[in-house]
Every structure is written in structure tokens, then in C-alpha cells.
Image (cartoon, rainbow, N blue to C red):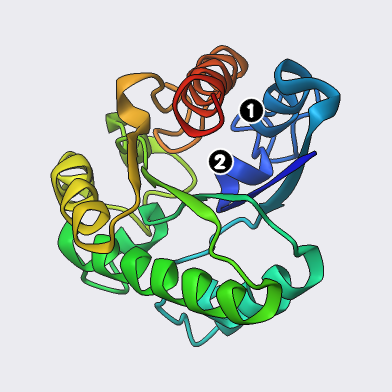
Amino acid sequence: MKTIMCYGDSNTHGFNPSNGLRYSRHVRWTGILAELLGTEYHVIEEGCNGRTTIYTDPFEPWKNGKFYLKPCLNTHKPIDLVILMLGSNDLKKFFANGAAQAADGAGELVDEILEFLEDKQGYRPQILLVSPIEIGPAVKKSFFKGQFDAAAMERSKEFPEEYARVASEKGVRFFNAAEYAKASDIDGLHMDPENHKKLAEAFYHVITEEIFP
């Protein structure tokens, strides 16, 4: 059995933009992926609303993705594949980051995953470094308008180029989520059920055809 850990933010957790709650397991892309892959795979959901790559919000420091990473990896090891999808929250006005800073932060997590698991489980896992979906214009009228501005929308369009760069530097696989899914028209940040399904199906094909053929 292959173990896949999905480490991300609210779009991995399954935030429902319609009501602020969480989609059911069968709607979340992680749950759909688990159903598609079947019993030969164990899919672990590790999504947290507001999680960043390596940046610390002084009001919610525990949402720094680096702080929880090692305990999480150690809890779930042995791990064969990590799907790492973080960076949208790095573009909050508070942090004043661009796509390059988000990608570099994700790259720091890639290093940590590879080095830590090589030590703790005796081998390095595969990593799928995911460039997040774009932030849509609906964010300007949403509950999150105070955190994300028009600049964040434009910077999110640069995710694919920057994440591809980091993936190449680190020698891991790259995946552009924006090719398959988009944010809802409700808040411009979170996916609706249809896009969760599209993303899950895209991950399924990459995993079964390229990573573990």
C-alpha cells in the first residue's frame, strides 16, 4: 500500500465558500482522490485553513506550515508521496509577499520533507509540488477582502512559473493546479464541488500514470 500525505491550506481542508464550514469527505478533492485510487493507497488529509508556507502571522503563529510539518511527517510515516499545495495565504497583504517568496517558502518545506523523512524512515518520499489556483476577482467583495487585494490576484497568476522554478531546483515533480481548477465566484479563494472533483481527477492521473505507474 502506498501512503500519500496531502499537506495544504483551506482548499485541502475543504473550506466551503457558501457557508464557511467544511465540505464532506466525498466532496473534498482528497476524499475523491482516495475513492479513485482505491484500497492500494492510503490518502491522508492534512489541510489547515489559513496555513502559510513558512510565514508567521503573530495572531495565529500555529498556521505557519513549517511549525507543524515535522510532527505531522513523523506521525504518518512511512510516507511514499507528499502532495504539497501551499502559498495562497502567503499573498495576504499582511506579509507583502509575491509569488516568488511563496514558491521559495514551499521550497524550504520540500527540503525539510526530504531530509527529515530520509532520516526518520530511511528513504525520501516522492513530492508533488503544487502551484495553487489563482485568486479570483470575487475576493474583492468577499469576507476576505481585508486580507487579499488586487495585487494578490495578479501575483497569484505568477505561481506556475515560480513553483516550476523551485520544483526544478529541488528535483521534484511540479503540478499546476490552475490548469485544472479555479476558485469559486463566491469568494475568489476556495473551490466549489465541481472544481474539487476536477482537481482530484487530475491528481489521480498524475499519480497512477507518472508517479506510481
Looking at the image, residue 16 lies above or below residue 62: above
Residue 155 at what x, y percent from top left?
16, 49
Contact (CB < 8 A) between labels 1 and 2? yes
Quadrant, the C terminus: top right
Kind of residue indicated by mark 1: Trp
Q: Is residue 169 left or right of residue 91?
A: left
x and y, in percent, of residue 120 in the image: 68, 79
The quarter of the rendered structure image containing the N terminus is top right
Pointer 2: residues within 10 angstroms few (<14), some, or many (20+)?
A: many
The amino acid at mark 2 is Asn
Residue lying at 75% horizontally and 38% vertically, measured from the top left = 22
Residue lying at the far right in this picture: please name it.
Answer: 39
Q: Nearer the viewer, mark 1 or mark 2?
A: 1
Q: Is residue 34 left or right of residue 109?
A: right
Residue 196 left/right relative to 144: right
Under tag 2, what secondary structure?
helix
Residue name at image x 58 percent, y 22 percent: 200
* Residue depicted at 62% across the width and 17% down the height: 193
First in sequence, mark 1 or 2: give its number: 2
x%, y% of residue 73? Answer: 68, 69
The residue tagged 1 is: 29
For the question of whether residue 127 can be seen, the reply is: yes
Q: Nearer the viewer, residue 189 or 143?
A: 189
Tell me if I can see residue 53 in this picture: no
Q: Give the side of residue 118 with respect to residue 53, left or right.
A: right
Q: Quadrant of residue 34?
A: top right
Above or below for 102 versus 208: below
Q: Residue at x 49, y 87 (%)?
A: 58
- Label 2, on which residue? 11
Residue nearer the viewer, 73 or 193? 73
